[in-house]
Amino acid sequence: MESWNTRVQEYLAASEPGKALELLEDIQETANPVWEHCRGRALLALGRAREALTAFAAMSENVRESGEEHQGERLGERLGERLGEHGELAALALSGQAQALVELKNPPEARLRALAAIESAPDLAEAHKNLGVALVRLGDQEGAEEALTRALELDSEYAEAHMAMALLRLTQRRLEDAESLLLRARELNPRSDAAC
């Protein structure tokens, strides 16, 4: 049987965040960090950044509490898997907060959250993309270039990273480069009408 998470991801990929949010609201797994992450993503896609920020903050709290449950354990493969999962979930929560903060026009705080996410999970392309967008908004083109390049190195098929790099190219008045990046983003996710 198909899981709720799979169905939510399909709705989000099909640019149907309203359906994703409806499904999530029916489930109400508020103590589940994955549920909070999916809810935050759906809210961001609907332009509800304040609510998304709250969802990602709840996700951070759930991950932290879950990590504390296992703090005393030091041995065993299961612990390693849990800690790895908690590190990645914590990074996803921080990265989601960064994206919401950019949308709420608070790039300095978004930059801090993205950096914290990268510290927790250095290979999380989403966090590098969110750092790059925050830096574009702060006018740090060199830093943005570095962050967005890293995001694309980590995931060359990440449509949002291509779109963010296009935003940077537009600020640099490199219109042909921006256009080709936007076309590549559209190839990777033809249903997305989202902008950076």
Image (tube, rainbow, N blue to C red):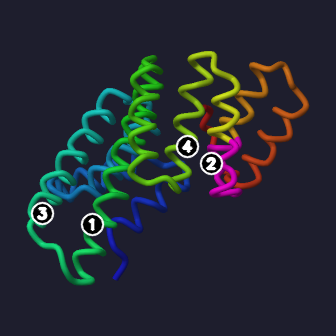
For residue 153: magenta?
yes
Spot occupied by residue 117 in the image (x, y as percentages of width and height): 41, 44
* Magenta stretch contains residue 40: no
Q: CA distance from mark 3 to mark 4?
A: 28 Å
Question: Closer to the camera, 186 or 73?
Answer: 73
Q: Sequence order check: which comes first, mark 1 or mark 2?
A: 1
- Do labels 2 and 4 touch, CB within 8 Å? yes
- Residue at (38% x, 52% y) in the render: 20
Q: Earlier in the sequence, mark 3 or mark 1?
A: 3
Q: Mark 3 is on which residue type?
A: Gln
Please tell me which residue is depicted at 25% across the width and 38% down the height of the picture. 57
Q: In this figure, what is the number of numbered marks?
A: 4
- Identify the disc placed on residue 128: 4
Mark-to-mark CA distance, 2 and 4: 5 Å
Q: Which mark is residue 151?
A: 2
Q: Residues within 10 Å of mark 1 (few under 14, many from 20)?
A: some
Quarter of the rendering containing residue 31: bottom left
Tell me: residue 101, above or below residue 4. Answer: above
* Left or right, residue 66 beside residue 122: left
Q: Quadrant of residue 132?
A: top right
Residue stretch in magenta: 149-162
- CA–CA distance between discs 2 and 3? 31 Å
Position of residue 6 relative to residue 11, above or below, is below
As shown in the figure, which amino acid type bears the numbered disc 4? His
**Closer to the camera: disc 1 or disc 2?**
1
Q: Nearer the viewer, residue 164 or 124?
A: 124
Residue 83's disc number:
1
> Which residue is nearer to you in this view: 153 or 50?
153
Disc with the residue nearer the chain's start (2 vs 4):
4
Residue at the spot of label 3: 71
Q: Earlier in the sequence, mark 3 or mark 4?
A: 3
